[in-house]
Image (cartoon, helix red, strand yellow):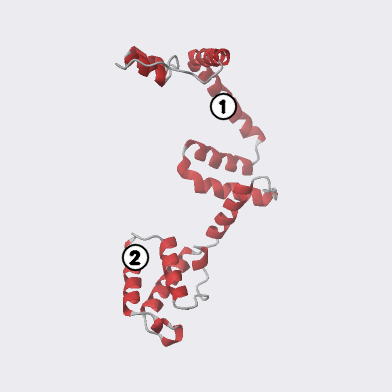
Amino acid sequence: MVGKEYVKDGKFIGAELASIISDKDFTLYGLEDTELFKKDFSAFYAVSQKQGELEEQLMGIEEQLALLKDVIYSQELKAFDVDASRYEEDPTFFLEYLSSLFAAIDELEIDLLPFIHLVQFHEVFSLEQAIDYEVLDEEIKNCAEMLMGTDSETNSQKMSDEMREGVKKQYQKYKDGTVGKKRIVMYLSGVAAQHDIALQEYQNMPRA
């Protein structure tokens, strides 16, 4: 359909296409200033007509920048640029990029106060980086076994058989992979708090 091609080319918007193909008779009203809308449309259309040419020019600029980077950038900056570029092309490299970003921020002692959300992210990221996940797994195992047991030294005898069974089921889900680390830690911590059982010996669990 020609109308759909016009939408793809930016000549029509969706509402305009609907007014053409719909069996219903209706009137379209625009909120834009007419003259500004026409100028905006003309600018957009002019650029869209040269899209291929502009993309080629941008590729050429990127190639020139790559050559300049190789000459000007330090080895550290080149490594950071690689991680930043990988993240830009594929968002799944987010954690790797954050690791490089925060390492550079810490090394250069950059003030993050103007970037308050990044400050909060930095704090959380730093805490997670400090977690020893092998030790955390062991702590979760020991904590769950302690809560499922009847050791009088831990006061777990205060718990009912039903609650111990609940801990057993949740811990099994964790081992099966259907419950994540954060969720099992929150669950075990909640059970312990409910029965006044101290967990100070588990250093990594509060960070999870």
- Rendered view: 9 above or below 168: above
Residue type for callout 2: Lys
Which of the 4 image quarters holds residue 138? bottom left
Q: Residues within 10 Å of mark 2 (few under 14, many from 20)?
A: some
Q: Secondary structure at mark 1?
A: helix
Q: Nearer the viewer, residue 4 or 85?
A: 4
Q: Residue furthest bottom?
A: 152
Q: Nearer the viewer, residue 12 or 35?
A: 35
Q: Which residue is mark 1?
A: 62
Residue 175 image label: 2
- Rendered view: 133 above or below 121: below
Residue at the image point whose x is 41% and y is 81% from the top? 156
**Residue 25: image location, x then y, percent:** 34, 15
Residue type for callout 1: Glu
Q: Residues within 10 Å of mark 1 (few under 14, many from 20)?
A: few
Quadrant (top left, top right, bottom left, bottom right) of the N terminus:
top left
How far apart marks 2 and 1 lie (CA) works out to: 48 Å
**Residue 89: image location, x then y, percent:** 48, 36
